[in-house]
Amino acid sequence: MITPPFLTHGDVVGIVAPARKISAQELKPAIEFLEMNGFRVALGKNIFAKDNQFAGTDEQRAADIQTFLDDPDIKAILCARGGYGSVRIIDRLNFDGFVQSPKWICGYSDVTVFHSHLHQLGYATLHGTMPINIKEEDFYSPSNTSLVRGLTGKSLAYTVPVQPFNRCGEVTAPIVGGNLSILYSLLASESDICTDGKILFIEDLDEYLYHIDRMMMALKRSGKLANLAGLVVGGMSDMNDNTIPFGHTAEEIIARVTEEYGYPVCYGFPAGHIEENMALRLGTEATLAVTEKQCVLRF
């Protein structure tokens, strides 16, 4: 796995909107935050375009990303927000320029499309908060601070309180993953990740509990869970249920689907669609240590 160069003072960060639309007002605090941290900011030409819920047409969104992929002066590409739309443009992109000058692709949620696709090409990416989440009144939140640490090559180490379904163990392996719904939607595509021998990270938002079960069963039946080195479960936020309850929480569903395996599992990790969305260098080696007292994930 190739790790893009870490950023230094004065490097240029490009911001694009590969999915849902965003306004200049919503983006203003993030630009200020990045500049405060010593970066220069370049905006995609079409970043404020609108096409119903999308940030412009597929052609416009793809063009912005392609421009930054090809530009060797751009050292990182931050996706402004998630939503839906990245999968519509991933096959329009040519990564030849990116291979010549690798850079960090950053974001979460719908950006899992890019994480997965680039991991299949052999490149590390950064899972973390996005510009839409950066607010002026909270510039130095743990999430924002970890984003800068992740981009600049600082160590990342997180300690998580014990959760009921944790499984103890310690392993060092590459970490991959992202949003469970997106991982599920990419199965059997060119962007589908290989999970064998790796730590899998998953999170999700606003799903029906039976959908969580369906997606976990799909990962299991497609061989994504059997040969993991470890499993890290992030936020499973705002889950929905039917009039007749499914009967299990998202965490209980995941525990049941993976109960036959022996690798360490950490629940309640602070990443995903939650207030603390800590940065993870996906594709790079991480150490997961789960004990009866705590869970530690470090890079």
Image (cartoon, helix red, strand yellow):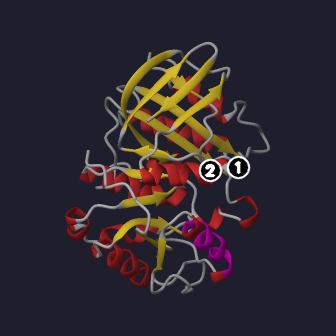
Residue at the spot 25% in from the left edge and 67% down from the top edge: 95
256 versus 39 height, above or below = above
Residue at the spot 76% in from the left edge and 63% down from the top edge: 137
Residue type indicated by callout 1: Glu
190, 178: nearer the viewer: 178
Question: Which numbered dot is residue 275?
Answer: 1
Q: Main secondary structure of the magenta part?
A: helix
Does the magenta portion include 28?
Answer: yes
Q: Position of residue 133 (x, y in %)?
A: 65, 62
Q: Position of residue 22 (x, y in %)?
A: 61, 77
Question: Which numbered dot is residue 164?
Answer: none
Magenta range: 25-34
The residue beneath circle 2 is: 143
> Is residue 127 rendered to the left or right of residue 208?
left
Residue at the spot 57% in from the left edge and 34% down from the top edge: 158
138 versus 262 height, above or below = below
Crowd rating for badge 2 (residues with CA inside 10 Å; few <14, some 14–19, many 20+):
many
> Is residue 71 rendered to the left or right of residue 146?
left
202, 46: nearer the viewer: 46
Q: Quadrant of residue 88?
A: bottom left
Residue at the spot 33% in from the left edge and 56% down from the top edge: 117
| Cα–Cα gap, marks 1 and 2 | 8 Å
Crowd rating for badge 1 (residues with CA inside 10 Å; few <14, some 14–19, many 20+):
some
Q: Is residue 51 visible?
A: yes
